[in-house]
Image (cartoon, rainbow, N blue to C red):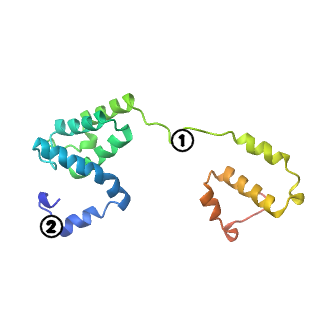
Amino acid sequence: LENKGLSTLTADIILQSWRQSTGKQYGTYFKRWMCFSNKRQTDPLDPSINTVLSFLSSLYDSGLSYSAINTAKSAISSICSVTSGIDIGKHKLVTRYMRGIFNARPSLPKYTETWDVNIVLDYLKTLPANEELTLLQLSQKLALLLMLLSAQRCQTVHLIKLNNITISNDN
């Protein structure tokens, strides 16, 4: 940013527009992009579209997933403009290239296994009436039902406070 004529203060403020996690996520690809540009002796802040596509191809060739390459494209797009003045992420060749990567190497689902909720529900049906359950059993049953109804993780259910729960006749 300073190489584009911005002051250090202005560059620092612009960099603060990213969340810390975004900076971390982009950091790896910025370093790779700078090394790639230096080896090719090209301007990393004003590359040709061919240079950008070559970089993305090198990432693809190294085995990276669509998601990782898309992150790299976003990182580059956030600091660069191509000679044609079109945003890298919106350039026709880049969007078609990314579609090609997605088709060739689609993203895998986050979870590879699922479980049958009916197993838990069938178990809950076998329990005696709530009045006959111990406090521990009743608490466990409630926790299970809350997790099933809200699709929350255990750590989230753990943080539920009773004074934040409202119970009425119809809900």
> Which quarter shows the C terminus?
bottom right
Question: Considering the numbered disc 1 on the image, is that residue within a helix, a strand or a loop?
Answer: loop
Q: Report how far apart the C-alphas of labels 2 and 1 lie in the structure.
A: 45 Å
Q: Is residue 57 above or below residue 131?
A: above
Identity of the residue drawn at 54% across and 38% down: 112
Identity of the residue drawn at 34% across and 32% down: 101
Question: Considering the numbered disc 2 on the image, is that residue within a helix, a strand or a loop?
Answer: loop
Q: Residue 103's x, y, as percent?
A: 38, 29
- Checking the image for residue 7, the label placed there is 2
- Checking the image for residue 67, the label placed there is none
Q: Disc 1 residue type?
A: Tyr
Q: Is residue 140 visible?
A: yes
Identity of the residue drawn at 25% across and 62% down: 14
Identity of the residue drawn at 37% across and 28% down: 104
Q: Disc 2 residue type?
A: Ser
- Circle 1 residues within 10 Å: few <14, some 14–19, many ≥20: few
Residue 120 figure quarter = top right
Q: Residue 147's x, y, as percent?
A: 67, 53
Q: Which residue is mark 1?
A: 111
Q: Residue 165's x, y, as percent?
A: 69, 65
